[in-house]
Image (cartoon, helix red, strand yellow):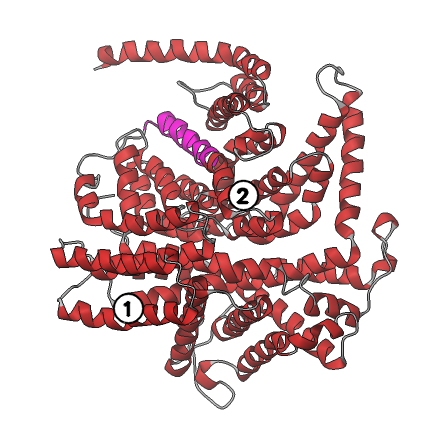
C-alpha cells in the first residue's frame, strides 16, 4: 500500500463483476446495452425521487420496483452459465434470446397487474378469478427463475420445498401435518395478499435498502472510502502485520458506507490484499482476513445490510434504535477478527508498513475532508428523527453537491459559496416545512436544471462530473437486482409459513428437543450450576445458531435472516428472549453466511484478488469469524450489550462488555496458537474453556475464567521476557 494507491471506480466495478455472480451481467449488443443502462438509471431516479418527495401507495411502489428488477434480471443475466458471444438475429434481438425478452415482459405485466386491480383486490382475496391465478402462476415461476439466474439454485429450491409443504400437507407426519392447500389457494395467499411476494421483505428493499445502497456508491465515488482507508492506514499500518490490521480498520470504516460484503471486500481488498502478501502473509490468509472483516459491513452503523432494515419493519421500531443496538455487535465482530490478525502477525513475525508505504494523512484530509459532509448530513437527519429514506435522499444529494462543487486540487471561494448555497436548499427541502409537494418539486427541479449552467459559468470542475454521477446511479441499481429477487422469493417462504402455521410447529419441535437435551445434561451436571430454563434456552440457541450457519452454506445473509426469523425467532421469544435480542441473534449468525463454504461470496471475491484457493480462503475466513461466535449468546443472557433493551443498566453492560472482550481475546489466541509465545495444545484447550466462562455474563464466571487461564498467562509472560532479554545478546 503506497500513497499513490487509490480506489479506481472502474477497476473496482470490473472486480465486482468478475467475482460477484450477482453483478456479472452478460454481454449484449449496443441497442440492448443502452436500453438496460437507461432502465437501471430510471429505476435509481424513481427511488431517489420517492425517497425525497414521498412514497407511492405501498402496493404500487413495490410493484414498480419489482417490475423493473425482475424484468431487468431476464435481460442482464443469462439462463446458462456460459455466456454466448452476442449475435443479433430474429430469435436473438439485441444479442439476447427472444424468450428472455418475453419473460421480462411477462413478469413485468404479472407484477403490475396487482396495482391495476387494487380497487377490486379486497373482493378477490380468498376467491381469486382464473386470470388472477394465471397471473400469479406466471409471477411465481418467473420469480424463481429470476432468482436462480441472479443468485443460484439454493434459494429457489428452498422456496419450492416450502410450496410443496403447503400443497401436500396431509402426507407429512405428526405435528407437521396440515390440511393442505390447492394451487389457487396458494397463489391467492402468495400473490393477492401482503403476506407473500408483496410482503415486508420486498417493501424494505424497495425503500430503505435501495436508497442506502445508492448513497454508499456515491460516497465511494466522491472519495469518502479512500479517506477512510487512509485514516485506517495511519492508525494501524505501522504495527505488526500492519496491512492486515488496516484491512480490519478499513473494512469497519468502509462498512459505514456499504452493507455489501462483496463490495467491501473488493474495495478495501484491492489495496490491502497485495500489501498483506508483500509483508509475508500467505495468500489464503490475506484473502481470508479481508473476507472476514468485510462481512462486518452488514452490521456496521449507520448504513447496514438489508437485514437491519427488515428488522425495523418486523419489530416496528425506529431505524435509530437498530443503529444504536448494532454498535456493540459491530465492535465485537471487528475486534474478534483484529485479535486473530494480531496474534497471527506476532506468530509469523510480520512487519508493519514503512513510512514510504503509508499514505500521507494530512494531505488526504486536506484534499478529502469535504467528503465527510454527506455522512454527517445523513447521520444528523437520522438523529433528528426524520425517516431513513429522507436521510438517504439528503445524503445522496449532499454527495452529488460535494462531488460537483469541490475539487481535490484546491477550491476557490466560489466553490465554497456554491457548496453552502446548495446545502441550504437541501436543508429547506428536508426541514423547511414546505407542505406543498408542487413547490418542493419545483424548487428541486430549478436547482437541478440550473446547477450545470452555474458550474460551467463559474468554471467549477468537481471531484466527479455529470457522467460519473449518472454512472453511479446505474451501478447503484445493479446492486439492487439480485437482492430484490431474493426478497421477493423469501416472500414465498414467509407466505407459506403464515398460511400453514409451520413456524409455530417448528418452534414447538425446537422447544421440545431443547428441553429433552437440557434434561439429559441436568442428569449429569450439578443442579447448582444451571437451571432447566437456562439450559433449555441455551440448547435452543445452539440449534438456531447451527441452522443459521448451515443455511449460510447456500443462501446469502438477508435470505438467511428472513427465513430464520420466520421459523426460529418465535421459539426464542417463547423462551423469554426479548424480540430485539432474538432478531440480533439470528442476524449476527446470518452474517457468517458470506464466509461459510461452499457458498462464500466475500471469501471467493477476496480469493480471486489474492490468487488463492477459494475453498481454503473460505475456511480461513470462517475460522477468523469464529473468534466472536459466542457473543450472540451474551446478547441473550445479558441484553444490556445491545444498549436499548428493556432493563438496561450500565453496570450490567460493563460486566458483560469486559467479559466479551476478554473472552474474544483468549479465544482468538487459542485459534491462532499464540498469545505472547507459541501455545501448547493443553493451553489451547484451557483458553477455549476460559473464554466460555469469560463470555458467560457475570463477575464470578469472568473471574473464574481468568483464574483458569492464569497459568498460561504466567508462562507466556515469563517466556516473552526471557526472549526479550536474549535479543540484545543475539545481536
- Is residue 565 visible to the viewer in this orientation of the structure? yes
Q: Is residue 178 left or right of residue 343?
A: right
Task: Where is residue 224? Give x, y as percent.
Answer: 29, 50
Which quadrant of the figure contains the C terminus? top left
Q: Which mark is residue 592?
A: 2
Please state which of residues 526 and 97 is positioned toward the viewer in this rendering: 526
Instruction: Find out whether residue 343 is within the magenta segment.
Output: yes
Instruction: Write down the quadrant of residue 194 in the picture.
Output: bottom right
Q: Is residue 238 magenta?
A: no
Q: Nearer the viewer, residue 573 or 421?
A: 421
Q: How far apart are the alpha carbons under marks 2 and 1?
A: 44 Å
Q: Nearer the viewer, residue 305 or 460?
A: 460
* Dot 1 crowding, Cα within 10 Å, few <14, some 14–19, many 20+: some
- Residue at numbered disc 1: 447
Q: Is residue 659 left or right of residue 407?
A: right
- Where does the N terminus fall, quadrant-wise? top left
Q: Is residue 138 visible?
A: no
- The residue shown at (74%, 62%) is 163
Magenta-highlighted residues: 331-349
Q: Position of residue 97 (x, y in %)?
A: 52, 81
Q: What's the mark number on residue 101? A: none
Which badge, 2 or 1, is on the more N-terminal residue? 1
Amino acid at each position: 500500500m503506497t500513497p499513490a494507491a487509490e480506489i479506481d471506480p472502474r477497476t473496482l466495478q470490473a472486480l465486482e463483476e468478475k467475482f460477484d455472480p450477482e453483478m456479472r451481467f452478460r454481454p449484449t449488443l449496443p441497442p440492448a446495452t443502452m436500453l438496460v443502462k437507461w432502465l437501471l438509471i430510471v429505476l435509481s431516479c424513481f427511488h431517489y425521487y420517492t425517497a425525497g418527495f414521498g412514497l407511492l401507495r405501498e402496493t404500487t411502489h413495490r410493484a414498480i420496483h419489482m417490475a423493473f428488477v425482475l424484468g431487468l434480471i431476464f435481460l442482464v443475466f443469462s439462463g446458462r452459465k456460459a455466456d454466448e458471444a452476442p449475435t443479433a438475429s430474429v430469435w436473438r434481438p439485441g444479442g439476447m434470446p427472444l424468450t428472455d425478452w418475453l419473460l421480462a415482459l411477462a413478469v413485468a405485466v404479472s407484477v403490475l397487474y396487482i396495482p391495476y386491480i387494487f380497487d377490486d383486490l379486497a373482493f378477490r382475496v380468498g376467491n381469486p378469478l382464473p386470470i388472477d391465478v394465471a397471473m400469479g402462476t406466471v409471477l411465481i415461476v418467473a420469480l424463481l427463475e429470476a432468482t436462480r439466474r441472479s443468485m443460484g439454485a439454493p434459494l429457489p429450491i428452498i422456496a419450492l420445498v416450502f410450496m410443496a409443504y403447503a400443497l401436500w400437507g396431509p402426507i407429512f407426519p405428526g405435528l407437521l401435518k396440515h390440511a393442505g392447500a390447492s394451487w389457487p389457494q396458494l397463489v391467492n395467499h402468495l400473490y393477492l395478499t401482503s403476506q407473500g411476494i408483496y410482503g415486508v421483505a420486498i417493501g424494505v428493499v424497495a425503500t430503505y435498502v435501495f436508497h442506502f445502497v445508492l448513497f454508499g456508491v456515491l460516497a465511494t465515488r466522491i472519495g469518502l472510502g479512500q479517506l477512510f482507508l487512509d485514516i485506517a492506514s495511519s492508525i494501524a499500518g505501522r504495527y505488526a502485520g500492519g496491512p492486515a490490521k488496516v484491512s480490519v480498520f478499513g473494512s469497519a470504516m468502509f462498512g459505514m458506507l456499504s452493507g455489501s460484503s462483496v463490495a467491501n471486500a473488493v474495495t478495501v481488498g484491492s489495496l490491502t490484499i497485495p500489501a498483506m502478501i508483500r509483508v509475508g502473509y500467505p495468500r489464503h490468509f490475506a484473502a481470508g482476513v479481508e473476507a472476514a472483516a468485510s462481512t462486518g459491513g452488514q452490521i456496521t452503523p449507520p448504513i447496514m445490510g438489508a437485514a437491519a432494515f427488515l428488522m425495523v419493519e418486523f419489530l416496528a421500531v425506529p431505524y435509530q434504535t437498530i443503529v444504536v443496538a448494532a454498535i456493540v455487535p459491530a465492535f465485537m465482530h471487528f475486534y474478534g477478527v483484529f485479535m486473530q490478525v494480531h496474534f497471527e502477525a506476532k506468530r509469523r513475525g510480520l512487519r508493519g508498513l514503512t513510512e514510504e508505504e503509508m499514505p500521507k494523512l494530512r494531505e488526504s484530509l486536506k484534499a478529502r475532508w469535504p467528503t465527510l459532509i454527506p455522512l454527517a448530513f445523513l447521520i444528523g437527519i437520522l438523529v433528528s428523527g426524520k425517516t431513513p429514506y429522507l436521510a438517504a435522499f439528503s445524503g445522496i444529494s449532499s454527495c452529488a453537491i460535494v462531488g460537483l462543487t469541490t475539487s481535490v486540487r484546491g477550491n476557490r471561494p466560489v466553490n465554497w459559496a456554491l457548496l453552502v448555497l446548495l446545502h441550504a436548499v437541501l436543508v429547506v427541502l428536508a426541514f423547511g416545512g414546505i407542505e406543498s409537494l408542487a413547490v418542493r418539486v419545483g424548487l428541486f427541479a430549478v436547482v437541478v436544471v440550473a446547477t450545470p449552467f452555474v458550474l460551467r459559468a463559474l468554471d467549477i470542475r468537481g471531484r466527479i462530473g455529470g457522467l460519473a454521477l449518472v454512472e453511479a446511479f446505474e451501478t447503484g441499481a445493479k446492486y439492487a437486482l439480485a437482492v430484490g429477487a431474493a426478497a421477493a422469493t423469501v416472500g414465498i417462504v414467509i407466505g407459506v409459513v403464515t398460511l400453514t402455521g409451520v413456524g409455530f410447529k417448528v418452534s414447538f419441535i425446537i422447544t421440545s428437543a431443547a428441553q429433552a437435551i437440557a434434561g439429559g445434561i441436568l442428569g449429569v451436571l450439578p443442579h447448582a450450576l444451571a437451571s432447566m430454563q437456562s439450559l433449555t434456552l441455551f440448547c435452543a440457541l445452539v440449534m438456531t445458531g447451527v441452522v443459521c450457519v448451515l443455511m449460510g452454506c447456500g443462501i446469502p445473509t438477508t435470505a438467511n435472516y428472513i427465513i430464520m426469523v420466520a421459523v426460529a425467532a418465535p421459539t426464542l421469544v417463547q423462551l423469554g428472549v426479548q424480540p430485539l435480542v432474538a432478531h440480533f441473534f439470528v442476524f449476527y449468525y446470518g452474517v457468517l453466511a458470506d464466509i461459510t463454504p461452499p457458498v462464500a461470496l466475500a471469501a471467493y471475491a477476496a480469493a480471486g484478488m489474492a490468487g488463492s484457493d477459494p475453498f481454503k480462503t473460505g475456511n480461513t475466513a470462517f475460522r477468523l469469524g469464529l473468534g466472536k461466535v459466542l457473543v450472540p449468546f451474551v446478547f441473550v443472557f445479558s441484553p444490556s450489550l445491545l444498549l436499548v433493551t428493556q432493563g438496561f443498566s450500565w453496570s450490567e453492560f460493563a460486566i458483560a462488555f469486559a467479559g466479551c472482550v476478554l473472552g474474544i481475546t483468549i479465544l482468538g489466541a487459542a485459534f491462532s496458537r499464540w498469545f505472547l509465545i507459541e501455545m501448547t495444545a493443553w493451553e489451547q484447550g484451557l483458553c477455549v474453556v476460559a473464554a466460555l466462562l469469560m463470555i458467560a455474563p457475570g463477575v464470578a464466571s469472568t473471574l473464574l475464567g481468568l483464574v483458569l487461564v492464569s497459568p498460561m498467562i504466567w508462562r507466556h509472560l515469563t517466556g516473552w521476557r526471557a526472549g526479550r532479554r536474549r535479543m540484545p545478546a543475539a545481536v
